[in-house]
Image (cartoon, rainbow, N blue to C red):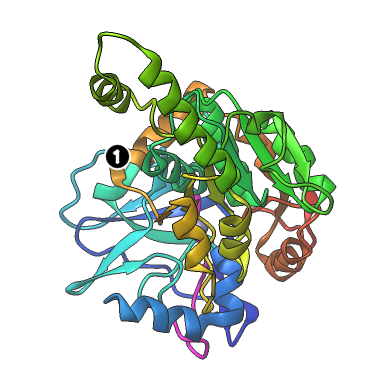
Amino acid sequence: VRAVTCTDGVFELVERPSPVPGPGQLVLDVHACGICGSDLHARAHADEFAATVAEVGYDGMFRSHEPVVLGHEFTGVVAEHGPRTRGFHAPGSRVVAFPLLRHGDDVHLTGLSPHADGGFAEQVVVEEAMTFAVPDHLDTDVAALTEPMAVALHAVRRSGIGKRQTAVVVGCGPVGLAVIAILKASGVRTVVASDLSAGRRALAAQCGADVLVDANTGSPFDTGASRGHVTTAAQLFELAVGSMEKLRRIPVVPWERIWKLAEVTGATTPQHPVVFECVGAPGMIERIVSSAPFRARVVVVGVCMATDRFRPGLAINKELDLRFVLGYTPGEFRETLQWLADGRVAATPLLTGRVGLGGVDDAFTALAAADRHAKILVDPRSDAVTVERC
Ligand SMILES: [Zn+2]
């Protein structure tokens, strides 16, 4: 079978023996496999990436000199069952798979480890227990978005955002766009999106963003949606003294009791947005910490692997919540697939390009240029060596 290997950042289209499924595994014919931001990052900074992941206890990520087949966002057709499989999916049926694979005693990241080749190939091996049937009416390409959309679903769940809270999405690359689509599908009324690129802001609008901010000239914390947010210490002090003056004027009921009641209903906490950092570059946390209103919750979704700095003093003064998120659970993966099948989430604007195995290098170049593309799908059945617009 044909596969694209990446060695020292160089792609090569090679012919390899057909993969052999182990116990409980399936071989899929790949029909679509998305290129992820982490693929771009891993290609350029594999060793740094591998060292970071090794520090949290996973030593199986590829190093730059090891040939690896990237790709962890795929839809495939069941081609072969390994021994001791349960037969959930008939041969020929379409599935998506959670990208984790057993190899000996270990579990590896599919498409990011030399022990678990990914989807930039005609075939890929997956765990039967981690595969989910694609509903008949769901498009194969859209199904391939299950993985990146699951990242967004997980981020939105972990953010704890309420429908009436303002969401601010900083960065409208594939991650930011997925977060916007999931926020809207979750019923969040107001989503503010900011990006430097006009092309990406247009995609954000298609994904459902309500307020678009040109990051070259404006702040996402200074729009109509920011009304009621506390942005200065002076405002906070005025709020404290002003509230107490009012409470003390109330006869009969002691003010402490009203305060306790207000605390229970959340009325003593200033209204605040939930901010999603979806850029993943050094300096972004500082930029948000310095410009977000008091009590804002900051959810860091963008993957920045470099050492970064920010001023805790600002975060302390504003009592910001800083929360980091990664990945998703099998339950969230399966739920995302269902949301895509139900048409509940506007994911199709993410699909901007398509290419064959021979065009993977061209696709990575196009994605690095940022403005024109969000998600490019690799289709091993296509002969296209340059990216075609979807
Ligand atoms: Zn990914």
* Residue that numbered label 1 is attached to: 331
In what element is the residue under mark 1? helix
- What is the quadrant of residue 231 in the picture? top right
Q: 69 or 338: which is nearer to us?
A: 338
Q: Position of residue 222 (x, y in %)?
A: 71, 40
Q: Is residue 368 above or below residue 373?
A: below
Q: Is residue 12 above or below residue 279?
A: below
Residue 351, percent across and down?
A: 67, 43
Number of numbered callouts drawn: 1
Residue under the image location 51 percent in, 45 percent down: 294
Q: Is residue 69 magenta?
A: yes
Q: As drawn, is 282 to the left or to the right of 253?
A: right
Out of 294 and 35, give the one closest to the viewer.
294
Residue 103, given in percent of the width and then of the height, sits at 25, 71
Left or right: where 29 falls relative to 361: left
Task: Look at the numbered disc 1 and say if its residue's Cβ is closer than 8 Å to ligand 1.
Answer: no
Residue type highlighted by circle 1:
Gly
The x, y position of residue 82, in whole percent, is 25, 57
Q: Which residues are magenta?
A: 59-74
Instruction: Look at the image and tell me whether residue 135 can be seen.
Output: no
- Kindly report the secondary structure that dominates the magenta region of the rendered protein: loop
Residue displayed at 70% across by 38% down: 204
Residue found farthest to the bottom: 65
